[in-house]
Image (cartoon, rainbow, N blue to C red):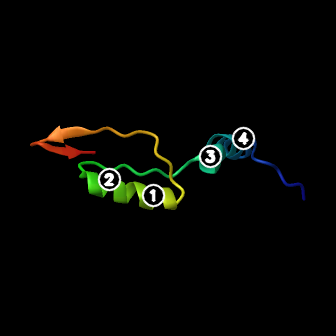
């Protein structure tokens, strides 16, 4: 008995592998924090750096006379 191959199913799986596999292999975890005081920012920075994260962007601003990050 000869087995037939469903080409559309194979092509779909091949396409999904080429599209989604690189995303899964090269994706990176990230953390976003908002409204932190200077002390909270320093604690979060130190903790996250020790866990292998690196800072890519930070913004500081003043809210009701206090520094926020």
Query: Label for residue 48?
Result: 1
Q: Earlier in the sequence, mark 3 or mark 2?
A: 3
Q: CA distance from mark 3 to mark 4?
A: 23 Å
Q: Secondary structure at mark 2?
A: helix
Q: CA distance from mark 1 to mark 4?
A: 42 Å
Q: Earlier in the sequence, mark 1 or mark 3?
A: 3
Residue beneath label 2, please? 41
Q: x, y (%) of residue 58?
A: 36, 40
Query: Mark 2 Cα within 10 Å, few/some/many (few <14, many 20+)?
Result: some
For the view shown, which residue lies furthest in the left direction? 64
Q: Earlier in the sequence, mark 1 or mark 2?
A: 2
Q: x, y (%) of residue 34?
A: 28, 48
Residue beneath label 3, please? 26
Give the mark toward the camera: 3 or 2.
2
Q: x, y (%) of residue 23?
A: 60, 44
* Image quarter in which the C terminus is found: top left
Give the mark toward the camera: 3 or 4.
3
Residue beneath label 4, please? 11
Q: Residue at x 37, y 49 (%)?
A: 32
Q: Earlier in the sequence, mark 4 or mark 2?
A: 4
Q: CA distance from mark 4 to mark 2?
A: 49 Å
């Amino acid at each position: 008995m000869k087995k037939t191959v469903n080409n559309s199913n194979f092509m779909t799986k091949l396409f999904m592998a080429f599209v989604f596999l690189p995303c899964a292999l090269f994706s990176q975890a990230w953390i976003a924090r908002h409204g932190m005081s200077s002390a909270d920012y320093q604690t979060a920075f130190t903790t996250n750096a020790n866990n292998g994260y690196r800072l890519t962007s930070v913004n500081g601003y003043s809210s009701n006379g206090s520094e926020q990050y």
